[in-house]
Amino acid sequence: MEVGPSGLAAGEIAARLAVAPSTLSFHLAALERAGLVAATRQGRSIRYAVRIAAFRSLLAFITETCCAGDPGRCGDLARLLPDTPRPETDVMTPAFNVLFLCTRNSARSIMAEAILEKFGGGRFRAFSAGSDPAPAPMPEVIEKLAALGHDVSRLSTKSWNVFTGPAAPRMDFVITLCDTIENEVCPDFGDKAITAAWPLPDPAKFTGSVAERQTLLNELYASLRRRIEIFTSLPFETLDHMALKARLDEIGGRVHA
């Protein structure tokens, strides 16, 4: 954080922290997988730099979930969160359309739409739909999103047919959030759309007490937010279609919480 976007070579980080290279390598790899640092090779060395946008997003998430929305309750956290947003220089600048799909479009895809819309930094336009949409989003989901500061006024269930045809907005990414969508074949969203599967449990099938259901919803929200934060931190400008597809599939397969 102190050296800014230029970062430091791995050897210099190890020396400054007095950490064994093997231990440092383990932690840097975890931070890179989480999208919190970026690695670039220069000659024989690898330099690591903090992804400021992802780091600030993480701090904001901690503030919301652990400090009850009050950074002052978490000590030094308030100092690390600037009062005004900073320009996001370490991530892509073009705007991309992202469509999240699940069968009923009442919980997982609604959550994903709200999360990306809030934390996409204006670089993404989020949409959601389903193959067999419910009449309305699950009330528990809307309540959870509202409590976490999301704008829920425009969230609604809709058929994925809304996003097909010549008049529909072109999708750059289409991400399904369930194992299968009622064994149906997804419509054609255009040959340029990159598809991926991020399977997550269906909240409609959650059982247990009110407290247990709230815990499960919290876990679902955290998992979606973590995946979306990694997604928004990808170096889009340096990855081709196949590489982006592989990275999206990797996010869906390795991120569980």
Image (spheres, helix red, strand yellow):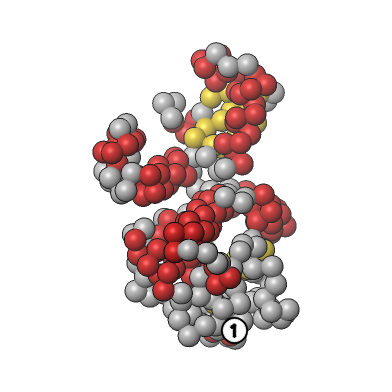
Q: Could you tell whether 119 is left or right of 235 in the image?
A: left
**Residue 257 can be seen, yes or no:** yes
Where residue 195 sits: x, y (%)? 67, 66
Give the total number of marks visible in the rendering.
1
In the rendered image, residue 237, in percent from the top left (x then y), is placed at 58, 51
> 111 or 50, which is in the foreground?
111
Residue 203 image offset from top left, x and y in percent: 54, 68
Residue 100: tell me if it is visible: no
Q: In the image shown, does 239 or 62 lie closer to the viewer?
A: 62
Determine the residue positioned at 49% across, 35% down: 50
Nearer to us in this view, 244 or 81? 81
Above or below — where is 101 with respect to 49?
below
Asked which secondary structure carries label 1, the reply is loop
**190 on left or right of 125:** right
* Residue 66, horizontal then vertical, whole percent: 38, 44
Looking at numbered disc 1 in the image, what kind of residue is underneath it? Answer: Asp
Q: Residue furthest front?
A: 209
At label 1, counting other C-alpha atoms closer than 10 Å, the crowd grade (few under 14, some 14-19, many 20 or more) is some
Q: Is residue 172 above or below residue 120?
A: below
Residue sitting at x 58%, y 70%: 205
Quadrant housing residue 80: top left
The residue lying at 69 percent from left, 54 percent from top is 253
- On screen, residue 180 above or below 210: below
Query: Which residue carries the number 1 mark?
Result: 132
